Image (cartoon, grey):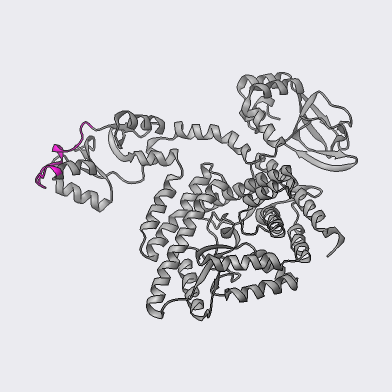
Amino acid sequence: MLPPKEFLRKIKPFSLLRDEELEKIVGKLEVEAFEEGEEIIKGGKSGDYVYFVYSGVVGIYENGKLVDRFSRGEIFGLTHNPQRVAVAEEDTICYLIKKDVFTEIMEKNKLFSDFFKSFEEKRFSRIPDLFREEEITDRLFLTRVGDLITKKPVVCSPYTSIRDAAVKMELNNVGSIVVVDDNLRPLGILTSKDFRTFIIYGKSHEEKVSAYMTSPVVAVDHSTPVFEAHLELLKRGINHLVVTDDGKVKGVITANDILTLFEPTTSLIVLYRRLKKANNLEEIKITFKNLSKSISALVTRGMHFYDLSNLLTEIYDYMVVKVIELEREKFESEKGKLPDFAWIHMGSSARKEQVMATDQDNAIIHEGDGEELLLFAEKVNTALDYIGIPKCKGGYMAMNWCKSVEEWKNVFSEWFEKLTPENIRLLSVFLDLRVIYGNEKLYRELIEHIKLEHTPQSLRFLAHDATMTEPPLGLFGLRMKSKIDLKMNGIYPIVNGTRILALENGFLEITNTRERLEKLRSSGIMDAELAESLKETYEFLQDLRLKMQAKEIVEGKKADNIIKVSEMDRLDAFVLKEGFKVIKRFQNFLKGHYGIERGL
C-alpha cells in the first residue's frame, strides 16, 4: 500500500490540496478493514468520519434498497442521511478522515470546497474546470517558444538584394526573413512592414537588406517560456521574435502564434476568414480538412461543448450555404431557374450541436414540381461529400427526401397515425428540423402542421422509445462494463425526451437541447432542479465525448461514441455515474408523465 499522503496526492480532488493541508488530513488519518456484509455506517448514526475507499466496494442502502455504490478512489459519508446505511459489498479497506478536519480544510480551500459543492448542485461541467485552472496556468508558463515554431527559418545574408529577399519570402509564404552571418547567427530581421518603407522611398531593388533590416534583432532562446516571450513583444511593441538554439536561428514566431496559445479560438477565426474567401469546392475542402484539427486543439485546451458548438454552427452553416450557392449557380446556368425551396438540416446539425466531423442529415421542402430539385440535391449532397461531410449511410439526405410542403404534411400525418417502429424511428430523425437556406415560410408552414397533427398516443410511443435504453446503473453499474456508448446510453435519452416535451408544448422550432430545457424550466413544465441537472449532465456527456473523439483524431483513428471504462479518468467515471443517475430520474419522469408503465 502506498503511503497515505502519496496515494491521496494522486487522487482528485485531493490533488487540489496544498502540502500542509494534506499533512493535516494524514496526521488524523485512520485505516480500517471491513469484511463483506459488514455495516460501515449504521442507519441514524451521523458518524465522525468521511470515508475514502482504498479498495473494495461499498453499497449505500435506503429502506433496504440499494441507492448508490462507491469503489476505489471515491468518497462517502460527507453528508448525513439518517435513513441510509453503508455496507461493505466485498472485503473493503477505507481511509477514515476526521470530519471536522475535512470541513475545516473545505472552508479554507475554495477549489476543494467548490469540487464538493459542484457535485451537490449537479454542476458537472464545472468540475473539470477546477483542475483545468491550474493546467492553463501551467501551459502558459511551461510551454517553450520552440514548441510554437511551425516552419524552418527563412534566412539570407546581409548582402542579399531587396529583390531577392522579397522573392524568397514570397516562395516560402512568410512575412519575415532573418538576416544571418555565416554561422547562422541573427544580425537583423526584415519584415513586410520594412518593405513598405522601402517602397515609399522608391529605392532600387538591388539595394542590400542590411540597409533596411531591423537591427539588432530581438531574439530569445528556444527554451524561453511563452509567457516571457509575450511580455517581450508587448514591452518592445514588435510583432516578430527570432528564436535561437545555441545562438543559431531556429525559427521565427509572431504575436499571432502566441495568441493562438492564449486564445484557442484564433485558429477557427483564421479558418472562417479563409472560408469566406473561398471561390470553389477545392478551397472549401482544404479549409474543412483543417477544421477538425482546430476543433481537437480547442477540446484539448478545455473549451466546453456549448461554447464550441455555438461557434462551429456558424462555420458549418456558412460552409454548407456556400456549397449550395456554388452548386445552384452552376445548375441554374445550365438548367434554368429552380423553384422556391428550403434546405433543411436534421439531427445534431438542426440542434446546433454538431461538433466533430459527422455525416449529412438534410432534406428539401419545395413548392411546385420538384424533379429538377432532385437532380440539384444530388449534386449538393455529392459536393458536401467531396469537401469532407460524408453522405449519410441511412440515406437521410435531400437527394432522397425532397418533397413539396403538401407532400411533407401527408408524410408526417401518416407517421403520427401509423405508429410502427419504423415510423417512430423516422419521427425521431425528422422532428428536429432547422432551415439554413431558402424560403423559411415553407419550413414554418410544415412546423405548424406538425404541431396540430401529433397525438397523445404518438407522444407516448416516442417517450417509450426515449426510455427503452437505460444508462448502466444496474447491479454492478460501470464496474461490469468494459465499454459504454455515450450517445445511446446518455445523449440519446436526453435529446429524445426533451424533444418530445417540446413537441407536446408547442415550441418545436426551438431545436437546441439546452434551450429546450431552459424553456421547459421557465415554463414550469419541468422541475427546475431536474432541468438544471439535465443541462449539466448533457454538457458533461458531450464534453467527455468531445475529449475522447479529439484524442482519436489526433491519433489518426476514426472518431466514435464508444468509451472504454478502463481508460477513463477516475473522476470522469465518477461524474459519469452521477450523470447517469440524473438521466434515470428523467426517464422515470417521462414514464410517469406519459403513462408508459401502464402499457402502450
Q: In terms of depth relative to the viewer, which is nearer, 221 or 256?
A: 256
- Write the residue at 82% across / 36% down: 91
Residue 479 visible in rendering: no
Query: In the shown orientation, is residue 135 left or right of residue 10?
Result: left
Q: Is residue 135 left or right of residue 250?
A: right
Quadrant assignment for the N terminus? top right
Which quarter of the picture shows residue 10? top right
The residues colored magenta run 200-216
Residue drawn at x 60%, y 61% is 347
Q: Where residue 386 appears, x then y in whole percent?
A: 45, 67
**Quadrant for the C terminus in the image:** bottom right
Where residue 493 appears, as percent x and y from the top left, is 71, 55
Q: Where 447 falls versus 583 (above or below)?
A: below
Lateral position of residue 594 relative to residue 278, left or right: right
Dominant SS type (magenta): loop
Give percent across and percent down for residue 539: 62, 47
**In this rendering, is residue 287 above or below 581?**
below
Say if residue 154 shows up in the picture. yes
Question: Does the stretch in magenta take in 299?
Answer: no
Q: Is residue 129 above or below residue 600?
A: above
Q: Foreground residue, 89 or 595?
A: 595
- Please name whichever residue, 554 or 60, is drawn nearer the observer in this view of the structure: 60
